[in-house]
Structures are given as structure tokens and as C-alpha cells.
Amino acid sequence: MIYVVGIGPGGYDGLTGEALEALKTCEVISGYKRYVELVKDFFPEKFFMSYPMRSEVARCEEALKVAEMGYSVALISSGDAGVYGMAGIMLEVAKGLADIKIIPGVTAANSAAAVLGAPLMNDYVTISLSDLMTDWEIIEKRLRTACNGDFVICLYNPASHHRPDSFKRACDIMLRYKPPETVCGYVRNINRPGQESKLMTLDEIRDCEEIDMLTTVIIGNSQTYALDGKMITRRGYEKAVRSEEVGGRNEEL
Ligand code: SAH
């Protein structure tokens, strides 16, 4: 059996009950070394396989071999394994030959939103700024499309040493569609030692030096505002109340 487990944003606290159960049940825990370090102390009796970055296919092939030898393996991803994580590649590598169970986790967008307030109260998108597997032109197109739709935008992989300007470039595109005072926020190291977060405007966050690979950024839409240091996106209750008053529908609130 191979469990593909999203371990949430940080340590033990961020694990769902189901993820915890899978990690307790399995014999081998496998994953990127930074994530293995996050869970290692809590499961000292397990056998660990830790890997450097960009060894995703090898991780899956070896998990498959270990499972074929009769051991149960938990292949871990941070956040949710199905969001820029290991779930898809594991299913592709296994080609139906192994029993695979995907265990969902709390993705960075949701945990960042909770730290910042309630910015995801209406429709939102996630966009990764990593051009390792997606061409930059496509990323730009998605940013423009999300701005056109007035979505709240969660940015994953916002900047790295290899592409220090990608976040600024993304902000410059969004500044063509959104006012500079648009409320935004970032959270760095969510649920990990050194967690930090800040609310800013779009033109301020463009030049923020703290944005890196350990950061998730949330860019508000036209309904997002700051209240008592929290970021809130209006869902539209005023409209729902007005519509109720004139005898209209009332969706679940
Ligand atoms: N599968 C993960 C995402 C992996 S992509 C998930 O569902 O959350 C890696 C990106 O996720 C990082 O560059 C960052 O933007 C975001 N991220 C993941 N964990 C984070 C954390 N603890 N704090 C801040 N951002 C995080």
C-alpha cells in the first residue's frame, strides 16, 4: 500500500486526523528531506527515505519498489499532496500497479488565509510562479485571466534564487488590472518556526524583500479590504440580505 500524504503546512499540529493515521500505520516514510525532517521526531520507529529537491520521479519509483517488497509506504508532500505535490506523479508512475491512497492535507492557500484573516470568502485561484514545468508566458496569461475575472489570487512559489524577479514581474502585470492600493498579504513559514506575516498594498508588496520560496502571497480582489489588521474579502451578504427582503432566493450562508 502507498499512502500519498499531505502533511499540512508545518509540523504535527497541521496534520489532519487521517494523515496522522496513515503516518502511524505505514512502515516507511518517504519524501523531500525538509518535509521528512518535519515529521521525523514524531515517528521515531519508522524507516525514513529522504530525497533532495527535484527527484520526484525517483521518489515514486522507489516507493513503488518498497511497496512491491511488501511494506506500506507514506510518500509525503507539504500542504496537500494533490496541489503542486506528489499525488499526480505517483499515480502516473504506478500505472495502476499498486494500491494507492491519496490523503488530503491543508494546502498553503488555506492556512495562509487563516493567518491573514478571511481573504478567500469568494472565488479565488492559485497560481504557481515556478516556470520549471510551466512556461512563463502561460503563467502571465493565467495572471491576466485571473485579474480579468476579479478573482482573489494565491501565489505559490512566488520567488526563488534562480528567478529573483518573477514576483515583481507578476505584480507589474497585476498592477495593470488592479489598483495599487489593492489589499494583499504574505505569510512566510506557516506553522513552522519563524512564521511571519504582513498585510500590504499591491504596490508595496511588489518590492517586499521577504517574499521567497517559503512564502505564500494572497492578492485581494475589488472586494478585499483590511479591518483591524485582518484581510477580508466581502462575500456579498448585503446583497443577499437585500434580495431576501424582496423575497428572492437565499443561498446557504
Ligand atoms: N503541496 C503544497 C504546495 C507545494 S508548492 C501545498 O499544498 O501547500 C511550494 C509552495 O507552497 C511554496 O513556494 C510556498 O508558496 C507554499 N508553501 C508551502 N508550505 C508553506 C509554508 N509552510 N509557509 C508558506 N508557504 C508555504
Image (cartoon, helix red, strand yellow):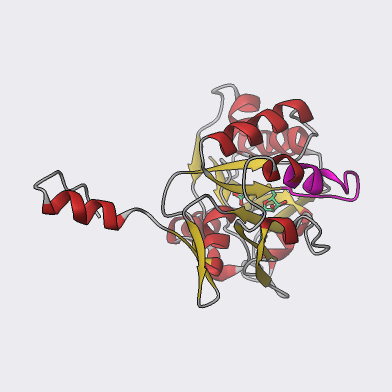
Q: Is 158 contained in the magenta span?
A: yes
Left or right of 191, for residue 237: left
Rendering coords of residue 117 (x, y %): 50, 67
Question: Residue 95 location, x and y as percent?
Answer: 59, 21
Looking at the image, residue 218 lies above or below residue 143: below
Residue with the most extreme left position: 247
Of residues 130 and 67, the one drawn nearer to the viewer in this rendering: 130
Can residue 213 be seen here? The reply is yes
**Residue closest to the eye, 176 or 189:** 176
Magenta segment's dominant SS is loop
Which image quadrant for residue 193? bottom right
Residue ID at (54%, 23%): 96
Residue displayed at 64% across by 33% down: 144
Q: Position of residue 247 (x, y in %)?
A: 8, 47
Residue 207: quadrant of the picture: bottom right
Is 181 included in the stretch rendered in magenta?
no
Q: Residue furthest right?
A: 162
Residue 23 vertical position relative to residue 97 in the rendered view, above or below: below
Q: Which percent across, then down, holds residue 55?
A: 80, 39
Q: Residue at x 76, y 44 (%)?
A: 172
The part of the image, by quadrant, that contains residue 235 is bottom left
Count the labels in the image.
0
Q: What is the quadrant of the C terminus in the image? A: bottom left
Tell whether 232 sits left or right of 248. right
Q: Is residue 85 visible?
A: no
Magenta stretch: give its range: 157-171
In the displayed orientation, state which residue is furthest to the top: 95
